[in-house]
Image (tube, grey):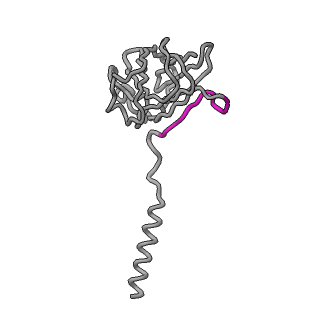
Amino acid sequence: MKNLLLILLLVFVSNFTNAQNFRGLDKSPLDMIEYPARGGNTLARILYGRPQLEGRDITRLVPEGQLWRFGANEATELTLYTPMKVNDKKIDAGSYTMYAIPQNDQITIIINSATHVWGAFSYNKKMDVVRMTVPLRQATVSLEAFSMAFQKSNTGIDLHFGWGNYRGTLPFSK
């Protein structure tokens, strides 16, 4: 009986210590950007997964002419805390999903009223709020991880984004 209790105790302890092991870091970690970045009157926030190239060809990860969730895992989420304009189209304060369609040297950015969406599998064009095609620039320095950043502009804020050698800017105006 003593041996049975000892064995049960050892099994319990070994299972408990194994449960404390982490499975490793997420391959496409979640990131968040806000404007302004620290305190103040926040205008916008974006939550997005940051996929990594890891030696892969970006055109295979994000094929031309195909809808992309504008990040990894869950679709990218945009929250506007004040009404803004994109391409002269007013967007009310609220939460939205962002998608993109790359094509040659440009990318169409889509702001859609759906929220809490995984990937682009349930994308519904009828829920599009605005679409804007922006030019893509080639950079000499490659970005390993898909990255975004807000920057103040004369008319509002610009969303800069890039991955690999591609760079683009989506302007938001007040």
Q: Is residue 66 visible?
A: yes
Range of residues picked out in magenta: 29-40
Q: Nearer the viewer, residue 86 or 24?
A: 86
Q: Is residue 49 above or below residue 153?
A: below
Describe residue 41's horizontal placement relative to residue 83 as left or right: right
Q: Is residue 144 magenta?
A: no
Give how far across and how far down residue 151 sits, in percent: 60, 22
Describe residue 152's horizontal placement relative to residue 110 as left or right: right
Give how far across and how far down residue 28 sits, in percent: 45, 39
Q: Is residue 128 above or below residue 7?
A: above
The N terminus sits in image quarter: bottom left
Residue at 47%, 47% in the rendered image = 25
Q: Nearer the viewer, residue 138 or 131?
A: 131
Q: Nearer the viewer, residue 170 or 80?
A: 80
What is the count of numbered marks?
0
Residue at 66%, 33% in the rendered image = 38
